[in-house]
Image: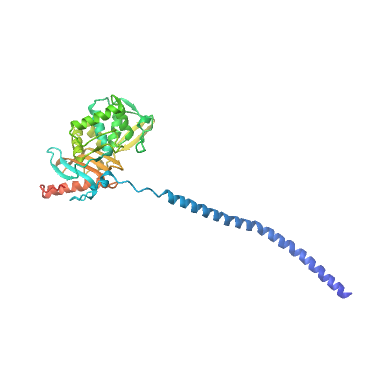
Amino acid sequence: MTKIKSCTALLLGLCISGALVLPAYAADGAARKPHLRKAAAAQSSKVVRKSASVRVSSVRKTAVRAEPARPSFGQAQGLHAEADPLELKSAVALVVDQDTNEVLFSKNPEAVLPIASITKLMTGLVVTEAKQSLDDVLTITQEDVDTEKGSHSRLAVGTQLTRGEMMHLALMSSENRAAHALGRYYPGGLEAFVQAMNRKAAALGMADTHYVEPTGLSSKNQSSAHDLALLVKEAHQQPLLRELSTSQEAQVAVGKRMMQFRNTNGLVRNPSWDIGLQKTGYISEAGRCLVMQAQLAGRKLIMVLLDSAGKYSRIGDAERIRKWLNHTTATAPAARPTT
């Protein structure tokens, strides 16, 4: 009887103990389940993010695979392979004495290439010789928006500026919409303006030159270094073109805002240079281009650089030519390389 009581007491104790332990275990399990669910969710999220990252990375890698850049006309014609004593990066170069027409340096001067925004020098010349009022207000319209290259412009559709301001921005900052508007407001419209450009080129003896529009965005606007030297010489006779093309910067009221424009040719801000007229140009087919009239080594010179490979190479080439001229003038003026 005593043994039975002892067993009963033992069983009762075990039951009570189990009853105490099970709730504790259950509570602990319940407490851990959210933690486990949270950990699992975090792990799942990591997997999803990693997967998404892989997909995004894959997309990005695909997006940056660009087509190889098309060669410029000069590159396609092998003009860059032509060696020259100054190791210029430009495919075409010409330096001429403005007063005597003596050729001091040449490299592929007869090659006919796209001239990009050098075109705007003829645009400015035609407008100037037409003697249209510089105070007339012109309006940028949808017609002036570039559909050739999709290039950016700071002149929104609806912008109103005087013809003089449009000329300034076209020659100094190479504003395409301004140049196009100048042609559009010519008597007879754009077609008549392009005809006037080509007539002027023919009158100057620019036999290798042809224009199809006033901005230079079309690669069909083409010329040679020899022809462009004739254009620079003629344009330099116009005080307005000299002033506007060499202006360092200008503030223009565009609507209610004052906008700052700068010259695309940094050499006009360089005190080592005395530049009387200049124009830069760039489209992919033409490479980097530059024409200038400048006082160098005590002479008035005309410099033409076409299809230069590299953003700053045309400026570097101009500096090489300047240093070479200064050196040869100081040492042996008669030693002038031509190729």
Position of 80 with respect to 326 (left or right) is right
Looking at this view, name the residue that lies furthest to the right.
1
* Residue 59 shows up from this direction: yes
Position of 255 with respect to 8 (left or right) is left
Position of 337 with respect to 286 (left or right) is left
Name the residue located 31 percent from the left edge and 28 percent from the top edge: 184
Looking at this view, name the residue that lies furthest to the front.
77
* Residue 297 shows up from this direction: no
The foreground one among 294 and 143 is: 143
Horizontal and vertical percent position of residue 204: 18, 32
Horizontal and vertical percent position of residue 309: 27, 47
Horizontal and vertical percent position of residue 141: 37, 29
Q: Is residue 20 above or below residue 294?
A: below
Horizontal and vertical percent position of residue 23: 74, 61
Name the residue located 66 percent from the left edge and 59 percent from the top edge: 32
Name the residue located 32 percent from the left edge and 26 percent from the top edge: 137
The foreground one among 58 and 259 is: 58
Q: Quadrant of the N terminus?
A: bottom right
Quarter of the view holding residue 295:
top left
Tell how many labels: 0
Tell me which colouring the rendered structure shows.
rainbow
The foreground one among 76 and 224 is: 76
